[in-house]
C-alpha cells in the first residue's frame, strides 16, 4: 500500500519519494488502474507522500524512473482539494513524471484559515508561487481545474520559467463571457450564498445545488462521493472571478 509521510519542506530540502514496491494488475487501456477501487496507482518503486510547506499541504509522487526533466504541478478548483487529483497523480507518475498537487490555504489538509472569506485570488497566487519557489520547480507544467485553471494562467503570466500550461474547464478570465441562467430551481440556495457573501463568511454549496451545477455530468452514483470532498471557499475570490480577472497572454511564454 502507499507510503504516507509528513515532512517539513525547507528551502534547501529536496523532496524524494521513497517506499515499498507496489504492484497492481493492469489493463492495457488503463495503465495502473486498480481493479477493485477503480483508482490509478503508481507502479514500481514509488509512493504517495504528503508534505507540508509552512501552512500548505501537498501530495507528491516521485516515480522510480523519471522520464521527463520537469514536474507537473496540479492546482484544484474552488472548494476543492488535492483529492480531486487522486487518479491523475499516480497515472502521470506511472508515465515517468514527478507530480505535485497543492492544497490552497484554508483547504484541508492545509492549515485552517480564520479569515478564509477574505482570501483573494492574489493570496492563492502567493501560495502557488511559494510552492514553486520552495520546491525549486520553476520549470514545471502547471495544470489547473476551474478556479485552479485561472490561477494556473496567472502563475504562467508571473513566472517566465513555467514550461507548459494546461487548464481543465478553467474559470474564465476578463473578456470571456460567463453566462448565468436566471431561471434556476434552487434560488433559495443562491440567496443563502449571497447572504454568506454579505456577512463575509466562506460558503460550501449544498448537495442539491452541486448536483445541478458542478456535478451534473457525473454519474449519480458518484456524485455524493465527490461532493464529500468539497470544502468551504472564499466568497471574495468568487466575487473577483465574477468581476473579471485580467490575464495578459503576451506575458505567458510557454510552451517552451
Image (cartoon, rainbow, N blue to C red):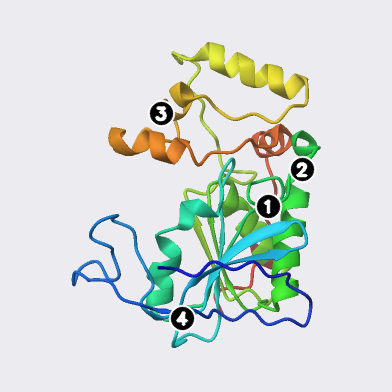
- Per the model, the C-alpha gap separating discs 3 and 1 is 26 Å
Name the foreground residue: 36 vs 242.
Answer: 36
Q: Which mark is residue 63?
A: 4
Residue placed under numbered mark 3 in the picture: 211
- Per the model, the C-alpha gap separating discs 3 and 2 is 27 Å
Picture residue at 44% right of the left edge, 58% below the top: 86
Is residue 150 left or right of 39 when viewed as pictured? right
Query: Dot 1: within a 10 Å radius of its alpha carbon, few (fewer than 14), some, or many (20 or more) residues?
Result: some
Residue placed under numbered mark 2 in the picture: 113
- Per the model, the C-alpha gap separating discs 1 and 4 is 24 Å
Query: Residue 73 falls in which quadrant of the image?
Result: bottom right
Task: Answer yes or no: is residue 206 visible.
Answer: yes
Picture residue at 38% right of the left edge, 68% below the top: 91
Per the image, label 1 sits on a secondary structure element best described as loop
Picture residue at 62% right of the left edge, 46% below the top: 173
Per the image, label 4 sits on a secondary structure element best described as loop
Residue placed under numbered mark 1 in the picture: 110
Which one is closest to the eye, mark 3 or mark 1?
1
Query: Residue 192 falls in which quadrant of the image?
Result: top right
Per the image, label 2 sits on a secondary structure element best described as loop
Name the foreground residue: 217 vs 107.
Answer: 107
The numbered mark, 4 or 2, whose residue comes first in the sequence reads 4
Amino acid at each position: 500500500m502507499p507510503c504516507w509521510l509528513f515532512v517539513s519542506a525547507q528551502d534547501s530540502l529536496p523532496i524524494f519519494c521513497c517506499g515499498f514496491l507496489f504492484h497492481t494488475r493492469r489493463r492495457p487501456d488503463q495503465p495502473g488502474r486498480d481493479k477493485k477501487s477503480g483508482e490509478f496507482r503508481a507502479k514500481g518503486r514509488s509512493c504517495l507522500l504528503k508534505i507540508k510547506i509552512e501552512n500548505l499541504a501537498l501530495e507528491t509522487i516521485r516515480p522510480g524512473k523519471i522520464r521527463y526533466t520537469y514536474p507537473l504541478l496540479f492546482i484544484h478548483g474552488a472548494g476543492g482539494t488535492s483529492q480531486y487529483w487522486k487518479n491523475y497523480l499516480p497515472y502521470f507518475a506511472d508515465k515517468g513524471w514527478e507530480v505535485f498537487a497543492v492544497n490552497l490555504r484554508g483547504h484541508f489538509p492545509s492549515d485552517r484559515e480564520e479569515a478564509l472569506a477574505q482570501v483573494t485570488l492574489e493570496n492563492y497566487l502567493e501560495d502557488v508561487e511559494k510552492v514553486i519557489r520552495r520546491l525549486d520547480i520553476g520549470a514545471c507544467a502547471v495544470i489547473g481545474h476551474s478556479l485552479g485553471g485561472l490561477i494556473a494562467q496567472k502563475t504562467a503570466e508571473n513566472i517566465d520559467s513555467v514550461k507548459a500550461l494546461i487548464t481543465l474547464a478553467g474559470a474564465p478570465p476578463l473578456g470571456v463571457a460567463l453566462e448565468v441562467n436566471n431561471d434556476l430551481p434552487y434560488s433559495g440556495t443562491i440567496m443563502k450564498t449571497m447572504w454568506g457573501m454579505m456577512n463575509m463568511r466562506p460558503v460550501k454549496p449544498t448537495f442539491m445545488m452541486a448536483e445541478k451545477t458542478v456535478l451534473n455530468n457525473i454519474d449519480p452514483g458518484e456524485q455524493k462521493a465527490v461532493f464529500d470532498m468539497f470544502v468551504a471557499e472564499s466568497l471574495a475570490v468568487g466575487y473577483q472571478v465574477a468581476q473579471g480577472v485580467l490575464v495578459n497572454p503576451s506575458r505567458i511564454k510557454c510552451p517552451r
